[in-house]
Amino acid sequence: MWYVYIVRCSDKTLYTGMSNNVSRRVTNHNNGKGAKYTRSRCPVVLVYQKNCRTRAAAMKMERFIKKLPPAKKRKLAGTHLRLPCGIIIKKGSKKKKQNLKEPKKGKK
């Protein structure tokens, strides 16, 4: 299982990442072994976590969250809004639009 997470840095900025072990990753950030962005902004605190079925879905979700305006990221981190992992970019238009779509559940 893969996860997308948001941590709040000591300077009140937010950092978004993905991992298959969030607690280990947050520990790495706090030990200065995480992302370059968080090394000078320790300690970090986990404020949001969303599980995704696959690594690819987690990557899409991470990219989607990173493109959000700061105010929406703060709202997401503060309220734990539920976002689906299936993000589809429509093709055929000049501007690429991102639509959120719930993953389809297969018949068992």
Image (cartoon, grey):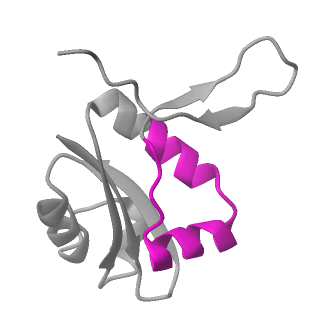
Q: Which residue is the extreme one toward the right?
A: 94
Above or below, 49 relative to 67: below
Question: Whole-percent x and y of residue 47?
Answer: 36, 76
Depth check: give the residue in front, 29 or 105.
105
Question: Whole-percent x and y of residue 108?
Answer: 17, 15
Q: Is residue 68 left or right of residue 51?
A: right
Q: Is residue 25 left or right of residue 36?
A: left
Q: Is residue 4 left or right of residue 12?
A: left
- The residue drawn where x is 70% and y is 21% is 90
Question: Whole-percent x and y of residue 39?
Answer: 34, 72
Depth check: give the residue in front, 21 or 108.
108
- The residue drawn where x is 52% and y is 43% is 63
Above or below, 102 relative to 14: above
Question: What is the quadrant of residue 88 in the picture?
Answer: top right
Question: Whole-percent x and y of residue 36?
Answer: 38, 61
Q: Which residues are magenta?
A: 60-84
Viewport quadrant of the N terminus: top left
Q: Which residue is the extreme one toward the top?
A: 92
Question: What is the quadrant of residue 34 in the picture?
Answer: bottom left
Whether the magenta-drawn stretch holds residue 64 is answered as yes
- The residue drawn where x is 43% and y is 59% is 16
Depth check: give the residue in front, 87 or 43.
87
Q: Main secondary structure of the magenta part?
A: helix
Above or below, 14 relative to 22: below
Whether the magenta-drawn stretch holds residue 34 is answered as no
- The residue drawn where x is 74% and y is 32% is 97
